[in-house]
């Protein structure tokens, strides 16, 4: 039997409008879709009626399907000659473990493509009215894991380089370590009054944004009961939010209607 094809697709940051055109095509032609918790389930309605949908969601500290099982499923379904779409929130190459999945596919001789997506570290701030770079405030930007410690508890993040060399920092999966993140940045040279923001469920109808400084953001996040998923953004660009905020948080998202309109237009053309 001829081997199938695997598409490792970034679903974007949450708003279904933000998936790429090619990403949508990979959903529509898939025989099997393995999707994560942070990929908007509204996108699944554009799959074929007989497509097999497999949830591979991951909560902090709790994995519905472990990574080894996901790798195995990708291989098994492709060896059955099926078109397989692995749908990941954001961009598959940004903390999406796409490298591990691609390595397994290479080992098995299975063809694949990586389809980039918009990552939440840029999109969530944009929807909150915070550009991650700005001529007057930030000429550098970094994406960092919010729990950068080894299994032995050793911290492998270069805090000095971040604090002294990067203007805007987006921490993924950092809500649980917010106090530690703020303390380490201040210890290594970031001003305590540096702007900070937490953006929960960025780009979706559930988006909430809390702003403050490295000194105050922890108490503000606690008062607002901000939880996962959320981006921790640090930098003076946060000061732009009062002037540039455009997205009305807490409103229904019309992403599915937008996608319907795109499909209707494609059919007419």
Image (cartoon, rainbow, N blue to C red):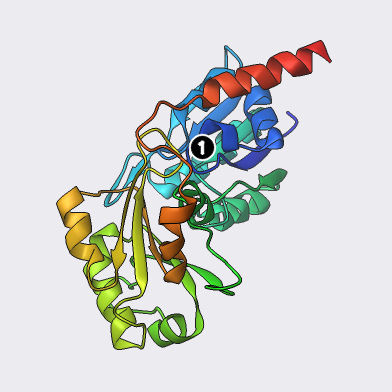
Q: Where in the figure is residue 217, as x and y percent of width and height?
A: 25, 64
Q: Where in the figure is residue 136, as x and y percent of width and height?
A: 56, 73
Depth check, front residue: 267 or 95: 267
Judge whether residue 4 can be spotted in this image. Answer: no
- The residue sitting at 59% across, 74% down in the picture is 139
State the residue lying farthest toward the front: 243
**In the rendered image, the vertical position of residue 91 relative to residue 179, given as above or below:** above
- The residue sitting at 51% across, 55% down in the picture is 97
Q: Is residue 205 left or right of residue 42?
A: left
Q: Residues within 10 Å of mark 1 (few under 14, many from 20)?
A: some
Q: Where in the figure is residue 253, as x and y percent of width and height?
A: 46, 27
Depth check, front residue: 186 or 106: 186
What residue is disc 1 on?
Answer: 73
Q: Is residue 240 left or right of residue 49?
A: left
- The residue sitting at 62% across, 17% down in the picture is 260
User: At numbered mark 1, what does the secondary structure look like: helix, strand or loop?
Assistant: helix
Q: Is residue 218 left or right of residue 35?
A: left
The N terminus sits in image quarter: top right
The C terminus sits in image quarter: top right
Q: Quadrant of residue 155?
A: bottom left
- The residue sitting at 56% across, 53% down in the picture is 98
Judge whether residue 113 can be spotted in this image. Answer: yes
């Amino acid at each position: 039997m001829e081997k199938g094809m695997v598409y490792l697709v970034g679903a974007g940051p949450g708003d279904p409008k933000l998936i790429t055109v090619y990403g949508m095509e990979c959903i529509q032609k898939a025989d099997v879709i393995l999707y994560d918790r942070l990929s908007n389930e509204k996108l699944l309605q554009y799959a074929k009626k007989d497509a097999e949908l497999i949830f591979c969601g991951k909560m902090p500290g709790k994995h519905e399907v472990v990574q080894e099982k996901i790798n195995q499923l990708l291989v098994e379904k492709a060896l059955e000659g099926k078109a397989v779409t692995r749908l990941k929130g954001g961009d598959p190459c940004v903390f999406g473990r796409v490298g591990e999945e691609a390595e397994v596919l290479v080992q098995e001789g299975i063809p694949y493509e990586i389809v980039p997506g918009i990552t939440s570290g840029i999109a969530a701030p944009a929807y909150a009215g915070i550009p991650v770079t700005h001529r007057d405030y930030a000429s550098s930007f970094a994406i960092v894991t919010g729990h950068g410690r080894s299994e032995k508890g050793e911290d492998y993040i270069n805090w000095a380089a971040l604090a002294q060399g990067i203007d805007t920092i987006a921490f993924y999966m950092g809500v649980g370590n917010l106090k530690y993140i703020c303390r380490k940045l201040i210890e290594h040279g970031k001003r305590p009054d540096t702007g900070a923001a937490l953006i929960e469920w960025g780009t979706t109808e559930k988006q909430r944004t809390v702003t403050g400084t490295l000194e105050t953001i922890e108490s503000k996040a606690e008062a607002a009961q901000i939880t996962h998923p959320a981006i921790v953004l640090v930098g003076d660009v946060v000061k732009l939010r009062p002037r540039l905020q455009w997205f009305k948080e807490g409103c229904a998202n019309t992403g599915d209607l937008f996608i319907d309109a795109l499909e209707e237009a494609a059919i007419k053309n």
